[in-house]
Amino acid sequence: MSSVHDAAQSGYSQASATYRRGRPEYPAEVDSWLTATLGLGPSATVVDLGAGTGKFTRRLVATGAEVIAVEPVAAMRAELQQALPQVKALEGNAAAIPLPDASVDVLVCAQSFHWFATEATLAEVARVLKPGGRFALIWNVRDERVDWVAAITEIITPYEGDAPRFYKGDWRQPLQSALFQQTFTPLQQQLWPHAHIGSSEEVIIARSLSVSFIAALPQAEQDKVEADLRALIARYPQLRDQHELAFPYNTEAYWCQKVGN
């Protein structure tokens, strides 16, 4: 679809299985955030916008709410439908959410809002939310205070081009607009330390190769990135020959409420 960045359309189409395997889960504290803070439960309807392969969608399903996943990339949506057949998975994007006005209680963007952070998106989110509905954003963010995590970033970043990234902070701009301030309550934040536990193949190789702009590279360049990552693993004593690693993250969650009763 034309409104989807090329890196996302191409990379996620080619690497949907790698994405599912390599991306971390979310900390246990997220479950109480979903129920106590966002108000999810059996009587609520929630949209997972930019749902990908359903990594976060599973957490929404566990609340007992009616879950609607909206995902523009067909390969990602197919992975989600196979894993979560009970979820209504719709083709759509942030510019055109295929739902009626004031039809949902909560809308969540997990690991996705930076791709479509515009005032037009905020207007569309406000359209589908009920008055008083909650809008939430969540990301797992690599903890680059750790030397080898920062070294992984140094390998990946030269390939990013103009792909939107969380760390660039551009996603914050529409949240400072007059539209946001008139339509939503002030943004609140919560932070949890987190770790992705698994083998180096899972938490470093598959995770890095699932990055959209890496997955969109020609195969020869992907092979170079993989070789550089394997050399990094061999270079750090705390990584090489380890059966299991704990890749450090911080999980950042944000939420607000649509003005109105």
Image (cartoon, rainbow, N blue to C red):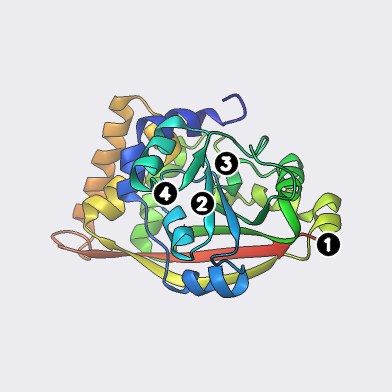
Residue located beneath label 1 in the image: 260
**Quick one: SS at disc 2?**
loop
Residue located beneath label 2 in the image: 111
The residue that appears at 58% across and 55% down in the rendered structure is 46
Residue type, mark 4 in image:
Gln
Q: Residues within 10 Å of mark 2 (few under 14, many from 20)?
A: many
Q: Residue furthest front?
A: 43
Residue located beneath label 4 in the image: 86
The residue that appears at 40% across and 32% down in the rendered structure is 75
**Quick one: SS at disc 3?**
loop
Q: Residues within 10 Å of mark 3 (few under 14, many from 20)?
A: many
Cα distance between the residues tagged 3 and 2: 12 Å
Of the image marks 3 and 1, the number of the one nearer the N terminus: 3
Of the image marks 3 and 2, the number of the one nearer the N terminus: 2
Of the image marks 4 and 1, the number of the one nearer the N terminus: 4
Cα distance between the residues tagged 2 and 1: 27 Å
Cα distance between the residues tagged 4 and 1: 32 Å
